[in-house]
Image (spheres, coloured by chain):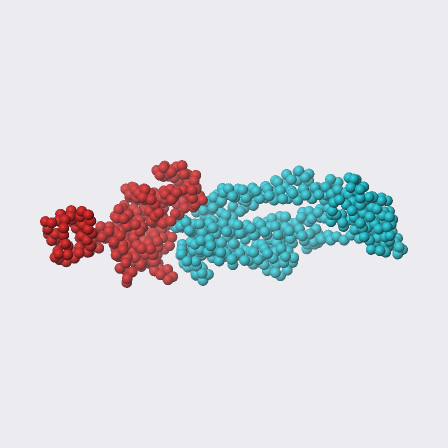
Chain colours: A cyan, B red
Amino acid sequence: MNNIGIVTSREYLTRVKKKSFILMTLLTPLLIASFYGIIIWVNIGQSESVEQQNIVLVDPSGVFSERIVSPDNIRFIPQKSYSIEDLIYADSIDAVITVDQNYTIDKPLTLNYKSMGSLSVNSNASIKDAFGNVIRDQKLSTMGIEQGAIDSLRSSVEISQVKVDENGDTKTSNAMINSGVGMILSMMIYFFIFLYGVQVMKGVLEEKTNRIVELIVSTVKPFQLMMGKVIGIALVGLTQLTIWIVLSGILMAIIGVIVGINFMDINELKNAAQNPDLSGMKLEDLELLTALQSLPFAKLFLSFLFYFLGGYLFYGALFAAIGSAVDNETDTQQFMLPITMPLVFSIAISFSLISGDPHGTLATWMSMIPLTSPIVMMVRMPFEPDLWQVLLSMTILVFSIIGVTYMAGKIYRTGILMYGKKPTYKELAKWLFYKN
Amino acid sequence: MEIIQVKEVSKFYANHTALNNVSFDVPKGKIFGLLGPNGAGKTSLIRIINQITAPDQGEILFNGQPLTKEHIKQIGYLPEERGLYKKMSVYDQLMYFARLRGMTRTDANQRIHNWLEKFEATTWKKKKIEELSKGMQQKIQFIVTVMHNPDFIILDEPFTGFDPKNTQLIKDEILNLKANGASIMLSTHRMENVEAICDNVVLLNKAKVVTQGSVMDVRNSLKDNTFSLTYSGQLDPTQIAHIEVKNLEQRQTDATLLFSYTGKPDIQLFNDPRINITEYREVIPSMQDVFLTLTDNSSDE
């Protein structure tokens, strides 16, 4: 095994064997899966648990009792009269609504709602709608409009997005799903760069302050030592990611079995929607899932892997350079700031500006600059930017990684053997041009 | 025969000179003291021998040949501070360094076991370095240094921070290595240790060689005509002609007089029936004195 290999395997094995790594790697998918499970459970549970409210309608004016249509969650029971005592002793009746005796449709309507519990927002809206509809229909029919015409006035508006590609093929697209997926993926890249980049820095710092470098740089070239570390830690990240994907898949399959549907199979989902057991699932939810299904998964996964690694390699080299330049962790802050600013900035605006206008000028430029491209391009990926843009961004990143690694190697080589004062940026620049 | 020959080596950094035309030889099979105050250039020199950096001028010969990467495997280095991964287990650590020095897994495994046994440390194999005491860590560091059977061993401050027991243990091990034929370069500020175990020394100050040679030669070279006389009885030293009194230490039963002769040394000057001489000797400066005198003088330049 050559030296980079020996260093890489040490960096990898010492980290993978750590208890904290094992815990985090195993617990995270469990957390995600249980979170996912809870959401499904709450959704389905809620739709089942919404009970019909029985509301007695006392309407001496006679305007509503004949015409009112009970909404899904409420059953109106017209009665001539209903006392408060009746309400208290009747278990099956939830509330009493009384309409003023002198009410005509020309007057504003005030409903008298008596119940032992409070009025929920949902019921409130349903009651208002139900009464409002009766009043409107009444008014329209006094104007001489027929019932059929009235019915046809009711309209529902929903936007169903379809994305057209160059070949004229269409697919369902959903802006919310796109930005959601983009955000999750870019957040993962962001955390990976930070968590593992800082690990590179700390590792370099440890070797420097413990004088381990002095023991080994005679046998291992500084560049090999740096690359071994960067690669070893990258493998740790990939291991973690792989375990996460596999475990999440298994756990989601288990949840799917428990709930009774396969979330990965769209046809099954469509069938499930017709399934009366799952009638709680709204059509909108199904459309979200359809949009999710129509995302270009292979493309997304490959670009994620690329930017996940590329972003880390780019920043990892920079973090290694920082670790080598200073003597202790407090001094790293000064140099970390300019490096982490672009990262923090891109994640901060990706919620709003990037996913708000994924093909705009700002988004395009930021997805080219290697400091921001791993995050910004990932936010854009679900919106499917032009292929040439993706390829250009990737090419720029690859060349930047080579350049940054070369420069970081130079700083590293000088930095790891320098002790004492904290270097200035000017000195760091000088180190770039030192010969061996 | 010399294991290391330093020939007119200079090393310059941006704003200071670390080594200025330094030449000396490290004899084979001996313990060699590399001495000097902080910043004298010792670390720079050790780094050049370890091939961490290259000299700007001059060269280093290893067994008569110019130093190359091939020689690294014949050199063992114990750094001043603990050069170990704190969170790594003793065994993994030793294996890692062994592999980097080109040993095979089986070979390294064998040697690690031998050394751990020798230091009665087999039970620590799985322990992390940070769980060990300073003395234990020092032993592990020592194993890292000598595990690959190097011909030439550089020990930078091997005694720092250790109790007398551990100091003795390391001293014994150093003498042991010498007995087994290794050449040792010892860099330390503890002059009593230099006197105790070093055969030869070189003293650096401000990037230059101030003095070098065998310990005895170096000490003798700084003799300043001071004598010590211990006696009992009544004596007024100021009354004795041809001597200059430097110090008189009067004790309950006897006294010690430090003095120098103004003329030729002659013990007959003290031929006095009232006193009884118990010790008379010429004072040879200790390494401590040599160090202080020589490094102090040059700082006045």
Picture quadrant of residue B297:
bottom left
Quadrant including the N terminus of chain A: top left
Across and down, in percent, residue A325 comes to 44, 56
Quadrant including the C terminus of chain A: bottom left
Across and down, in percent, residue A193 comes to 54, 51
Across and down, in percent, residue A428 comes to 45, 59
Residue at image coords 84%, 55%: A107
A357 vs A16: above or below: below
Picture quadrant of residue A394:
bottom right
Residue at image coords 14%, 50%: B234
Q: In the visual, does B190 lie left or right of B250?
A: right
Q: How many marks?
A: 0
Residue at image coords 38%, 38%: B121
Across and down, in percent, residue A329 comes to 46, 53
Q: In the visual, does B42 lie left or right of A226?
A: left
B243 vs B174: above or below: below
Picture quadrant of residue B162:
top left
Q: Does residue B138 appear in the picture of this structure?
A: yes
**In the displayed image of the protein, which residue is found farthest to the front?**
A85
Q: Does residue B23 appear in the picture of this structure?
A: no
Q: Nearer the viewer, residue B68 or A101?
A: A101
Residue at image coords 52%, 46%: A235
Q: In the visual, does B252 lie left or right of A288?
A: left
